[in-house]
Image: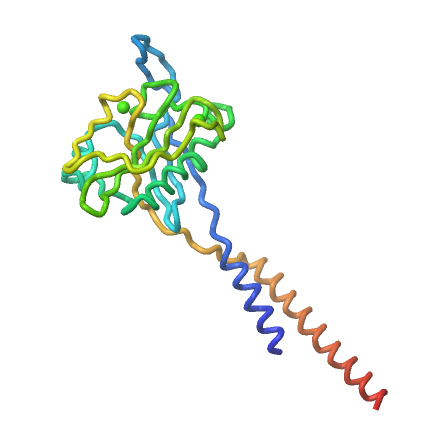
Amino acid sequence: MRKMFSAAVAALALTAAAPAAAEVTLQINANGTVVYNGNTYNNVPILNGATGVVVGDSIYDVRFVDGTCGSLFTNCGASGGAAFAFTDSTSASAAAQALFDQVFSLTANGQPIYYDWNPFLAGCGNFALCQSLIPYLNTNGSVFADSAVNYSQGYGDSNDRVNLGVNLGSPSNTDTSIYDSVTYAVFTRTGAVTAAVPEPATWAMMLLGFGAIAFQTRRKRHLNSTYLAQVA
Ligand SMILES: [Ca+2]
Ligand SMILES: [Ca+2]
């Protein structure tokens, strides 16, 4: 009986450990316009943001927005702006990596890893490079940012990287709208990653499995006692 119980606990633990798959959805303006090097490009699929991005044990929406730190984030002075979603470089750099792994890697415009090849992000007008800043406060109260530095080559390109610890100053009014290749990535937490709850059919299968284990355990015990009786 104890064996059966521990098998049941192990099966439940395995089930509970599997997180529910989060679905990342890209938010694209298919009719975007980019002015770059004096030329105007129409119908560029600009990536405005994404929903369902997982960083650590939380799920976030992310928006790519140009502007001053002070106009976008309460931590930089805005009233009604967003608070920094991340409190240190460890989590901010994980968020930058999540952009590569979960957002830029997706198929868009009919092509795989589309935004890894084409850094057409809102707030970036440079077709060759886009750096998405993810700000946080460092221990002495200065605004720092980690960033996803995405070049116009595909996944695994050696130029693509997470850049750590750019000092945006204190107080910060760093304005990304004056830089072609820099934008802010504004993360908003929307929920926690939840453990998957087994479907009724899965429960039925598990119960059948436990029943089979119990039957076999009992049968083995019976055979053992018969064998022992014969030997004695
Ligand atoms: Ca790239
Ligand atoms: Ca910009």
Q: How is the image coloured?
A: rainbow
Identify which residue is drawn at 18% across, 44% down: 141
Q: Nearer the viewer, residue 72 or 109?
A: 72
Outermost bottom residue: 232
Identify which residue is drawn at 39% across, 19% down: 128
Identify which residue is drawn at 35% across, 43% down: 60
Image quadrant in which you'd find residue 28: top left
Residue 38, percent from left and from top: 29, 8
Outermost top residue: 38
Task: Please say if 43 is above or below 130.
Answer: above
Q: Is residue 81 left or right of residue 28?
A: left
Quarter occupied by the N terminus = bottom right
Residue 114, percent from left and from top: 46, 26
Residue 55, percent from left and from top: 38, 45
Q: Nearer the viewer, residue 21 or 181?
A: 181
Residue 124, percent from left and from top: 31, 23
Identify which residue is drawn at 39% across, 27% down: 150
Q: Is residue 35 left or right of residue 25?
A: left
Image quadrant in which you'd find residue 215: bottom right
Task: Please say if 48 is above or below 221.
Answer: above
Q: Is residue 111 left or right of residue 7?
A: left
Q: Quadrant of ligand 1?
A: top left
Task: Please say if 114 is above or below 82.
Answer: above
Callout count:
0
Task: Please say if 176 is above or below 136.
Answer: above
Quarter occupied by the C terminus = bottom right
Outermost right residue: 230
